[in-house]
Amino acid sequence: MLSKLRYRAKNEVVGGGPAGNGGRHLEKQEELTREQTDHLLEQLWVAQEDQRLIPAQVTGDAPEHACSFQHTDDGTGCQNGCDVTAHLPYLKAAGLVEEVDGAVRLSETGAARAEELIRRHRLTELLLTELLDVDTAESRPDVCRLEHAISPPIVERICAFLGHPPHCPHGRPIPRGRCCGRITREVPPLVAPLEGAAVGQTYRVVFIAPKSHLRLDRLAVLGLTPGAQIRLHQKRPSYVIRIGETDVAIDPDIAREIYVRPV
């Protein structure tokens, strides 16, 4: 069950002083799930990444929803109840944000939590869009669910599987993790398309992501199935691979759909 992060009771004064003297009343008791809190932290991270200021107070001429996250491009856009200004009392009480010159910023604790969330989000998005060929827009709901479910060890395995990528599909930086700190050079992904394989090397087919089931059936007839061991003989003008005792020629667009790892 999701833990609930609850505001103080209705009409309790927040902000250091009686109502009408610097403090303010909460109109009603509200609840914020951990996932909603996570989304707020992610969105604040993106705002700071874009050098956008989030006001600590909404002025009379400002829109009711003043968090300005509607147009983020990486799936961390507005969620229900994500108005940072409205939820500022709890976020401050939890030590997740602070006010600096009238603007809301992540605290050290909030930034650490947001960094891990952003890392999970962008690695998961890359996994779904690049390896499983899921459309970016279609992947957003699943990315948002998965980022809250995967554990830190799995995040590191995904990162290593993808070759410690520096950017998400939208070009935004992926925060580095502990696994990235253990490498001193660019590390190729453990699994990559056949088009990037080296001639003369032996590989094992991990999975195939064809654009049509008919193509998958044809490859299966040739013996190109997950688990098959192949050797790449040439890449131009077409790819020639050996499967067992048989040499097979395939087009470059097909080679991009076959994911292999070195044997």
Image (cartoon, rainbow, N blue to C red):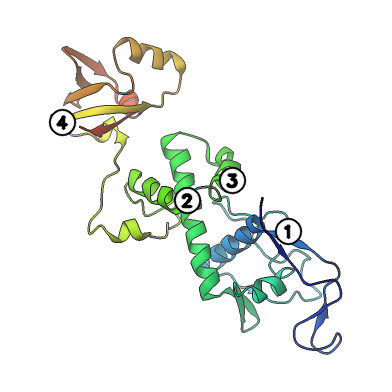
Q: Are marks 4 and 3 in contact (CB under 8 Å)?
A: no
Marks 1, 3: nearer the viewer: 3
Q: What residue type is disc 4 on?
A: Gln
For residue 38, above or below residue 14: above
Q: Which residue is mark 2?
A: 151
Q: Which residue is mark 4?
A: 201
Q: CA distance from mark 1 to mark 3?
A: 17 Å
Residue at 55% in and 75% down: 107
Question: How far apart are labels 4 and 3 at the CA level?
Answer: 39 Å
Instruction: Residue 148: give its label.
Output: none
Q: Is residue 102 above or below residue 87?
A: below
Q: Nearest to the eye among marks 2 and 1: give it.
A: 2
User: Who's the residue at 51% across and 51% down the image?
Assistant: 121
Picture layout, residue 158 above or below residue 78: above
Using a 10 Å C-alpha cutoff, classify the residue at mark 2 as few (fewer than 14 neighbours), some (14 to 19) or many (20 or more). few
- Kindly identify which residue carries mark 3: 145
**Total numbered labels placed on residues in the image:** 4
Q: Are marks 2 and 4 in contact (CB under 8 Å)?
A: no
Tell me what residue is drawn at x 29 percent, y 21 percent: 251
In front here: 114 or 249?
A: 114
- Tell me the kind of residue under disc 1: Gly
Q: Secondary structure at mark 4?
A: loop
> What residue sits right under mark 1 in the picture?
81
Earlier in the chain: of badge 4 and badge 3, it is 3
